Image: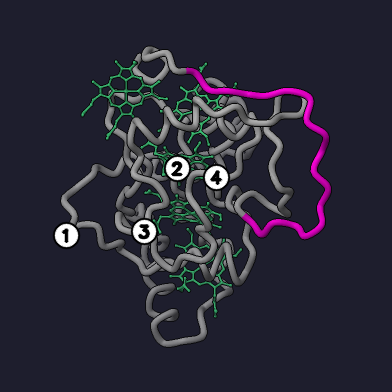
Amino acid sequence: MKNLLAILGLRKRLTLLLSLLILASGATATVTVAATAEEFTQPIAFSHKTHAGTNEIACEFCHTSARRSITSGVPPVRTCIGCHTMVKGTTETQKQEIQKVVDYWDQQKTIPWKKIHDLPDFVYFSHKRHLNVGFDCTECHGDISQKDEITMDNMATDLSMGWCVTCHKDEHPAVDGKVIRPLRATRGGKILEEANLAQQNGIVQGSKDCLICHK
Ligand code: HEC
Ligand code: HEC
Ligand code: HEC
Ligand code: HEC
Ligand code: HEC
């Protein structure tokens, strides 16, 4: 909170008030409580294929906290409205769905996105750690940029302990402590054809210690 205020302190008073309001509502978006399967229909038909695929918007443009915090979070309405005061949509359905975004913004309400990927509370997982060591979003989420909808059924993994531990046992070829991966233009984006892979000089491995994941 101290850092946050320091950053915001640089801004004018009015913007500060507004930002705090938005930040506060943005923060609540990440703690949407899991519900039963029938309740997983999202409030707005938002397509990753349109945004990350067709329009090539980088994952981290919206999921800004992935690299910096333990969660990736879901973007606040402010992120959407930057484009959607201008972009109104082509098809009737698009126009209707985009209008909903504008309505949330006008009412200064948080979009109640449902959380799909959700580990139990007794498991500790950090995005930051995995991204900093060089993994790409696709490694764990598959090619989200080709999905119109993210559901329990099309999730790339079951988020089971076996899934985590299997990868932690692997010896990942690395250069200077970072895993060697195919190069991509943006995280989660298409693999760049003919991009050279650096020469391996080590490996990285996750831990099998129970207390790493169960603190
Ligand atoms: C960088 C610009 C940009 C940002 C940021 C952005 N959008 Fe979009 N959005 C687009 C474009 C471009 C389209 C496609 C419009 C078209 O084809 O006419 C689109 C389409 C849509 C649609 C229509 C259905 C679909 O996905 O095809 C919805 C709903 C939508 N956006 C919601 C959102 C929400 C919610 C956010 C914030 C989380 C957001 N958008 C952020 C550019 C953006
Ligand atoms: C224009 C903004 C935008 C971009 C770009 C974007 N996302 Fe998202 N993402 C969202 C929104 C809004 C949601 C919540 C609605 C949903 O689940 O579709 C979401 C949800 C998700 C979820 C599921 C969250 C959950 O509850 O389990 C994952 C995983 C995800 N995004 C990964 C990615 C990846 C990987 C990329 C890049 C390929 C990406 N996103 C690009 C806005 C964006
Ligand atoms: C090492 C595997 C791994 C990588 C790499 C990864 N994720 Fe995730 N992601 C997960 C897991 C596991 C969860 C569930 C976390 C939870 O429930 O606490 C998750 C959840 C999410 C969510 C739901 C909200 C949240 O933070 O819990 C979003 C959005 C998301 N990831 C986006 C991304 C994006 C964008 C990238 C790339 C920048 C990425 N992830 C890279 C494993 C990964
Ligand atoms: C794609 C392979 C991969 C997957 C999948 C994966 N991890 Fe990891 N994880 C790693 C690697 C490699 C490291 C070591 C990173 C480093 O050295 O900085 C790591 C590090 C960690 C750490 C930090 C360990 C420490 O020393 O503090 C935690 C905690 C963790 N993973 C938890 C999980 C959990 C929980 C899951 C499943 C929900 C998971 N990981 C899935 C590869 C993976
Ligand atoms: C790399 C991360 C990781 C490590 C290391 C790990 N676990 Fe887990 N563990 C998980 C995840 C993720 C789940 C939740 C699985 C789910 O929801 O299906 C889990 C679930 C569990 C559960 C609950 C099982 C259930 O059916 O609900 C127990 C008990 C458990 N772990 C014990 C251990 C013990 C003992 C160790 C050490 C030998 C260990 N774990 C090491 C990630 C890990």
Q: Helix or strand or loop: what does disc 2 sit on?
A: loop
Q: Amino acid at mark 4?
A: Glu
Q: Which residues are magenta?
A: 189-207
- Identity of the amino acid at label 2? Gly
Left or right side of 190 for 206: left
In the image, residue 85 lies in the stretch drawn in magenta: no
> In this view of the protein, which residue sits in the foreground, 174 or 27?
174
Q: Between tags 1 and 2, which lies in front?
A: 1
The Cα–Cα distance between marks 4 and 3, rounded to whole angstroms, is 15 Å
Q: Quadrant of the C terminus?
A: top left
Number of other residues with Cα within 10 Å of mark 2, as a class: few under 14, some 14 to 19, many 20 or more = some
Q: Tell whether circle 4 marks a residue whose Cβ is less than 8 angstroms from ligand 3.
A: yes
Quadrant of residue 44 in the image? Answer: bottom left
- Between the C-alphas of marks 1 and 4, the distance is 28 Å
Label 4: state its secondary structure.
helix
Q: Are marks 2 and 3 in contact (CB under 8 Å)?
A: no
Q: Residue at x 38, y 79 (%)?
A: 96
- Measure how far apart labels 2 and 3 are at the Cα level: 19 Å
Residue type highlighted by circle 1 = Glu
